[in-house]
């Protein structure tokens, strides 16, 4: 089974001026990210405005990414939806479309207990082949539900295809607890972009980093230096990548990610309502900040 590792990008979803998924822009974004040296793609996640899209749109977008990537790097589709039935439908589509695996966000908005959490993930893991990788996805600050250590333990006892977790809350004590399952082949992927290097040092296998798509260079530098054992170079890259996170608001507003990509000539800026594009003033300020950043570090 393939695994997520290194710098994995939760892609924004390009929309055109008529609020449709823009497949030409999707192809450009896919090429841009692969050519930049990232290690994997993760469509239809939080950064991709997943809950603003219909299941049909998510299937079209994810299939386009898979087909255009043509095996150059792994593609893991985030399939978690508002209902278990829709999540299973999207999971089966990911298998049929040739994805390398899936991520599954927890149930959202309505609180669930451990029994309900385990039942939810078990239903999805059982709906795909036993050798098809499934990653749990915890983002409690948005979804209102966290994945307990007890729930993870029970899920690993039941499903050999649950191979890891993408955890997007800045809680290193919880990360440490998840990492205790490494001997069972359970990988931990960090979400918060500013914490990549310390998370790698703890034993995490990589990151799903939204900020990376805005300007991938410092993030790929960090990963490559870490893999080479050059910790000073990795630390230098971490300082640069963290500063870039500040420039693009570290995921607090996805419009900044799309605006940065537009400035780089990759996609247009369109957000889906209720999200709004940046104002002209905000766009110009971002442009200047990115120029200053690149000049400062010689990019």
Image: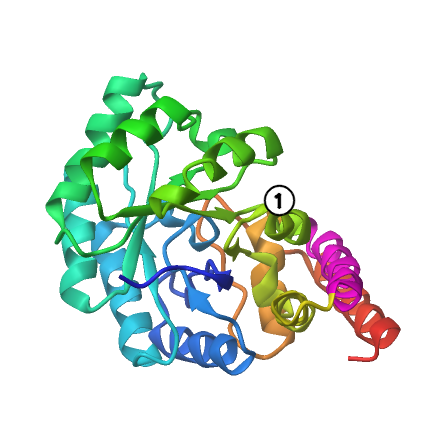
Q: Nearer the viewer, residue 290 or 278?
A: 290
Q: Nearer the viewer, residue 235 or 271?
A: 235
Residue 78 x %, y %: 33, 51
- Dividing the picture into quarters, in which one does residue 18 lie? bottom left
* Left or right of 291 in this view: 157: left
Compared with residue 171, is residue 226 higher up or lower down, i.e. above or below?
A: below
Residue 261 x %, y %: 58, 70
Question: Where's the N terminus, which quadrant?
Answer: bottom left
Q: Residue at x 35, y 18 (%)?
A: 111
Question: Where's the C terminus, which quadrant?
Answer: bottom right
Q: Residue at x 69, y 69 (%)?
A: 218
Q: Nearer the viewer, residue 199 or 29?
A: 199
Q: Residue at x 40, y 51 (%)?
A: 45
Compared with residue 288, is residue 188 higher up or lower down, i.e. above or below?
A: above
Compared with residue 246, is residue 32 higher up or lower down, i.e. above or below?
A: below
- Helix, strand or loop at label 1? It is loop
- Dividing the picture into quarters, in which one does residue 158 lie? top left
Q: Magenta includes 165?
A: no
Residue 205 x %, y %: 50, 55
* Left or right of 139 in this view: 109: left
What kind of secondary structure does the magenta stretch mostly adopt? helix
Residues in magenta? 231-249
Say which residue label 1 marks: 252
Q: Nearer the viewer, residue 100 or 89?
A: 100
The reply to whether residue 83 is visible in this rendering is: no
Q: Magenta includes 239?
A: yes
The reply to whether residue 254 is visible in this rendering is: yes
Q: Residue at x 18, y 41 (%)?
A: 124
């Amino acid at each position: 089974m393939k695994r997520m590792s290194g710098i994995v990008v939760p892609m924004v979803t390009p929309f055109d001026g008529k609020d449709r998924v823009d497949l030409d822009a999707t192809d450009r974004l896919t090429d841009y990210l692969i050519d930049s040296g990232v290690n994997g793609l993760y469509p239809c996640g939080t950064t991709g405005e997943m809950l603003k899209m219909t299941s049909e749109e998510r299937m079209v977008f994810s299939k386009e990414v898979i087909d255009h990537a043509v095996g150059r790097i792994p593609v893991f589709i985030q399939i978690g939806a508002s209902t278990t039935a829709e999540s299973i439908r999207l999971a089966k589509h990911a298998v049929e479309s040739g994805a390398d695996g899936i991520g599954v966000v927890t149930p959202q908005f309505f609180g669930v207990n451990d029994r309900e959490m385990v039942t939810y993930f078990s239903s999805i893991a059982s709906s795909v082949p036993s050798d098809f990788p499934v990653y749990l996805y915890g983002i409690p600050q948005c979804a209102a539900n966290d994945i307990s250590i007890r729930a993870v333990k029970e899920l690993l006892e039941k499903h050999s295809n649950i191979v890891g977790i993408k955890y997007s809350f800045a809680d290193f004590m919880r990360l440490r607890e998840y990492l205790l399952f490494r001997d069972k082949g359970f990988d931990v992927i960090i979400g918060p972009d500013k914490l990549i290097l310390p998370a790698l040092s703890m034993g995490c296998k990589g990151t799903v980093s939204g900020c990376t798509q805005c300007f991938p260079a410092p993030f790929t530098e960090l990963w490559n230096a870490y893999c080479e054992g050059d910790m000073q170079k990795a630390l230098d890259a971490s300082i640069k990548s963290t500063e870039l996170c500040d420039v693009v608001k570290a995921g607090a507003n996805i419009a900044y990610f799309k605006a940065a990509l537009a400035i780089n000539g990759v996609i247009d800026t369109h957000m889906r309502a209720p999200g709004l594009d940046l104002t002209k003033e905000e766009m110009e300020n971002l442009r200047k900040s990115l120029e200053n950043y690149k000049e400062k570090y010689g990019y």
